Image: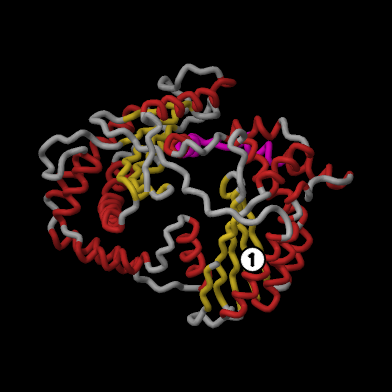
Amino acid sequence: MWHLQDRKFLRPTADLRLRLVGTPPPDAIPLAHACSDLLVLLAEDALAETAHAARSGGLGHSLEAADAAEFVLGVRGFHHRLATLAEEVLRIFSSFRGGGGGPSDDEGERRFERCAEALEREYGNAESRSYARCSATRIRCLRPAVRSDRAKLEALETLTPESFARTVSRMLDKMSVECLYHGNCDEKDAEDVAKFLENHFSAKGHGGISIPRRQEVIKVPQSVTDHIVTTASKEMTDPNTAVEMYFQVGLDNIYHRVIIDLLVDIMNSPMYDQIRTKEQFGYSVSVGKNWNRGVMGIIFQVVSSSKPAVEIHNRINRFILEFREILFHMKPEKIAEHLCGIAKIKLQMFNSMEEETQHLWQEILIRRYDWESSRKEACCLRAVTAEDAMQFYDRWLMGNEEDGHKKGDGRRCLVVKTVGSGEERPAIDSSAIDSHVDECVSKFHELAAYLTWKP
């Protein structure tokens, strides 16, 4: 449990957040995903009246499935009534442990059917836009543990109230709990909450488990050619084509992290101005940093209804090549301006207790636990030079060696294209579009030999 008493905003409120990690059945991961999502819907439905009354008293809660058998629960509001709401939310959630919480009467069965139907619609409508499918495909290529919405839907369609109760009971039998308590709460309050949580989760199941290992991330093979995954949009009439170029950098490292911040900050405006504003290449154009389960990267994204995927891919590559000359001739004073701007953002004070809580909670969710990460990054920026920016630009985006001239082994680049209606669209029957995506993802995993980054 992590605890911090607020001494800045001095409000009579507090925020309690929990990460609840169970044990998903290794032989039925899509089923575990579906059961986790359905459990959240059933719990929220059961909490509807309580949530309405809590809002009237300035309290609120949230519950979501972060992964298979992994849940994030939050309770916030006035401190003197926070424990009451937390107890009720945890009571409803824990009622699903040990095979309970399922439909035991006609009303329970109707609730199960209602929530299952809503979840089926959600899975069925997922990735309906080309850019959403493009991003989802990239994530599945990089994280083998992530399952498609189609696989979750197939598992959900075979789910019965009895099998749901058995699966959830198995997932929640052993749990680990990680907690952040922040706000108008002292050490004694935190000790009381910790004791309550320990007693609550020991009442059912078989005790806690250690925090599971972070999901593995595929190591994109280093190559002089880009690894291309081409899929079709879910809707055959979708006029948009989305392209994402993902450049994998490596494991989390504070120095590389700030270099990525600098390169993205320098490239962002020129890319948008040239490709979006001047050339009208696509209606959505961006470059940003990517942090995925402890692995860093840089991602270029373009969505267009007027250009084919091959042309978009070539245009992003041409921008990277042309921008190298701009970066090479950029004055050190200009680089310093970008460094100062990034540092100012990182050193900005929190505007509210909610912002500070979210910052602390994010460090817990990604399991980095560096509470002063922004300040440390700002300090690290002082050591960054124009030569560093050039060196890493060549290494990560150009695939060159450190001197910027000698050709290296290539870059770790994954290109995902989701093609809408047009000549480039893969010739696939509409009923086989989802299975084609699965096939493309599997082929990439085989190409990468299932090698992953090891912390």
* Residue ranking furthest to the right: 106
**Magenta-colored stretch includes residue 321:** no
- The percent coordinates of residue 351 (x first, y second) are 46, 73
Is residue 393 or residue 164 the one in the foreground?
164
**Residue 217 placement (x, y as % from top left):** 41, 41
Q: Which residues are magenta?
A: 118-136
Can residue 309 be seen here?
no
**Residue 221, percent across and down?**
31, 33
For badge 1, the amino acid type reads Val
Relative to residue 103, is residue 26 depicted above or below? above
Residue 439's x, y, as percent?
Answer: 48, 24
Identify which residue is drawn at 15% across, 45% down: 402
Most prominent secondary structure in the magenta stretch? helix
Residue 285 shown left or right of residue 41 in the figure: left
Is the residue marked by circle 1 packed among few (<14), some (14-19), or many (20+) residues within 10 Å? many
Q: Indicate the quadrant where residue 75 lies.
A: bottom right
Q: Which residue is mark 1?
A: 75
